Image: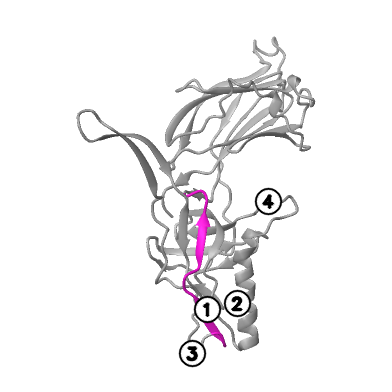
Amino acid sequence: MPIIAAPVLSPEEPGTPPPIEIPEVGYASITYVDPTGRRWPMTDLSAAWYTLAEGVSGLGAATYVLTADPHPRGGTKLRHVQAQDRTIVWPMHVRGIDHTVFTKNWRDLGRAFTRTLRTGADGRLTPGWLEVARPDGSGRRIAVYYHSGWDGLGQTATGITWDNASRLTLYCEDPYWEDLQAQTVHRETGAGVDYLAPYPAVSSSQVLGATTVENPGDVDVWPTWVITGPATSIQFTRSDTGDAFTLDMEDTEHGALLAGQTVTISTDPPGVRSDTGENLSDGLNWPEAVLWSIPPGATPVIFQLSGAEAGSAVDLTYHPRYETA
């Protein structure tokens, strides 16, 4: 029978610097992760660089543009709400035991931020991540790109063994913070059994079940689905709205998923890829397909796999998103 597993939380990454008090956040440990994956502690006051708490801004709730129409009885009627991109001001202090060491630290850290604007081998930009970890072990992060401000004070005695980038500005195309810990819902078929031994039992060719997905965040999340074969067709339905999408593997060049093969469906941006990198988007039931999101709170959903056997599974994964750090 299908099994619903409890949400699984991803482990927190090591290397968290000591907490300091940050405006709009309170006591927290901050780490910047550059596009190469290197982690730069931002709140270790004994390190060669750290955040200057005075001047930090942009960590609160997102900014919105409200579109309204005149109301015939007076006033206006709100028609549309659009979250805007976010700008974070992140002043930094950099130092070294001598001019050579300071210069290296200044250049290395500046490169760690500005390399978010350099395309990789795939021609795409890779953001950095600003991570905020709380003393209770929880944490949030936001994707950032360098905008401006990696420049010294230009004052007497600066630029020799220390300097401040007091207006370092980071651009966030998505204004929302996401949880460091992913939420996962897992469903899997059990092994088939003999109908008459030792007692009557039924083994279905489908993973079919209704469950409730909890989103503890402040805004909608756009999940990723990973399906493990065997399977011929996959359908996911959001029961409260009726939104649904179906991926018919037999309508793709790949064909049915065999045991151990996987396909990944991302909802934002929309995409369907096999474990060998094949684009399987043509297998979706366009134009009826709706790659739906999960709103805050409890959402009833149904997972269904046709042609399922022992080992067939569905994994739904998402990071809750929040207004503030």
How much space separates mark 3 and mark 1, taking CA atoms?
11 Å
The kind of residue tagged 4 is Arg
Measuring from the top left, give residue 176's x and y in whole percent.
Answer: 47, 48
SS state under label 3? loop
| Residue at the disc numbered 3 | 156
Which residue position is annotated with label 2?
Answer: 106
Three-letter amino acid code at disc 1? Gly
Residue receiving disc 4 = 124
Mark 2 and mark 4: Cα distance apart in space:
26 Å
Front disc: 2 or 3: 3
* Residue 162 lies within the magenta run: yes
Please provide percent x and percent y for residue 201: 64, 13
- Residue closest to the eye, 194 or 8: 8
- The residue segment tinted magenta is 159-175
Question: What SS does tag 4 mark?
Answer: loop
As shown in the figure, which amino acid type bears the numbered disc 2? Trp
Placement of 108 over or under 250, stated as above or below: below
Contact (Cβ within 8 Å) of mark 1 with mark 4: no
Please give the residue where the numbered disc 1 appears in the rendered image: 152
Q: Residues within 10 Å of mark 1 (few under 14, many from 20)?
A: some
Mark 3 vs 4: CB contact within 8 A? no
Vertical placement of residue 260 versus 111, above or below: above
Which amino acid, by three-letter code, is at mark 3? Thr
Nearest to N terminus: mark 1 or mark 4: 4
Choose the circle earlier in sequence order: 2 or 1. Answer: 2
Q: Tell me the CA gap for discs 2 and 3.
A: 17 Å
Whether pointer 2 and pointer 3 mark residues with C-beta atoms closer than 8 Å, the reply is no
Q: Observer-nearest residue: 246 or 152?
A: 152
